[in-house]
Image (cartoon, rainbow, N blue to C red):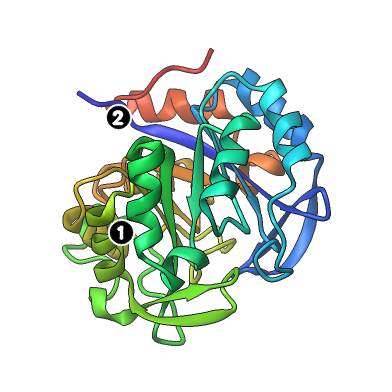
Amino acid sequence: MLTKRLIACLDVQNGRTVKGTNFVNLRDAGDPVALAARYAQEGIDELVLLDITATVEKRRTLLELVRSVAREVNIPFTVGGGIGAVADVEDLLLSGADKVSLNSSVLRAPGLIDELARRFGSQAIVVAVDARHALTQPPNLTTTPVTIPDVGAPAEAWDVFTHGGRHPAGREAVAWCREAAERGAGEILLTSMSHDGTRDGYALGLTRAVAAAVGVPVIASGGAGSAVHFRDVLQPGGADAALAASVFHFGDLTVARLKDYLLAEGIAMRPAR
């Protein structure tokens, strides 16, 4: 049985880790290098570092920061933000990243996924999909999805956004995830903007729909607030990995306690070190 993964996310702006709600109202969460080292020591399975303003500011990801984090960790490390060309990916992999995460650039030129997968291998290519529910209210933020046959909204109710959630891409989320996987993406990093930072639970309906549509691992992101939320997205939600930020950054959950809980719930997972 394949093990499920826990991933800590470091959203970086001006060299600091930040976290907000629904992609806005950011607050400082600490030094990304120190946080990366701490999470690796605590037994997190993987790290994702997202330079959240690189695309908007039309610049490349901060390579020196990537090198600094890579020196501190010995676990898989994904980097995203401002990646628009083969050279960008090569530089990041040479700087210590194990995978790269792409969003805006591959929506603009989907063929870039094919090219990068051919050159670096699908295992190094993660396509990040930022999706917002088309309605004003996010769907079913309940923490007890097992008793609800259909959690969330129909797949067509989710729209994809670019540039850190600022611009609609004119694409439907599930269809775009399927295309990205078919083009060679090794993983889908699926973030519900409607749930991001709310701590009310992941978008289970959307996650299930994407997991059913693609043949590659799906990383669920957006909405983690309790251990139950992780259990739900990894079991009925169908995700292969659960990504979170604020619950780790601000001490609501520790990696060890969360893993102990998930193992007790019957979820296959590497124990914390």
User: Residue 223 placed where, x, y %?
Assistant: 50, 58
Considering depth in this image, is 61 or 34 the residue closer to the camera?
A: 61
Residue at 42% over, 28% down: 261
User: Residue 76 placed where, x, y %?
Assistant: 51, 28
In which quadrant will I find the N terminus? top left
Q: Nearer the viewer, mark 2 or mark 1?
A: 1
Contact, mark 2 vs mark 1 (Cβ under 8 Å): no
Q: Is residue 143 above or below residue 231?
A: below
Task: Please tell me which of labels 2 and 1 falls first in the chain.
Answer: 1
Residue at 42% over, 69% down: 109
Determine the image quadrant of residue 260.
top left
User: Residue 237 placed where, x, y %?
Assistant: 28, 51
User: Residue 222 placed where, x, y %?
Assistant: 50, 58
Q: Is residue 219 above or below residue 44?
A: below
For residue 267, the mark is 2
Considering depth in this image, is 91 or 272 the residue closer to the camera?
A: 91
Determine the image quadrant of residue 125.
top left
- Residue 10 seen in the figure: yes
In which quadrant will I find the C terminus? top right
Judged left or right of residue 107, residue 48 is right
Considering depth in this image, is 37 or 205 the residue closer to the camera?
A: 37
The residue to which callout 1 is attached is 180
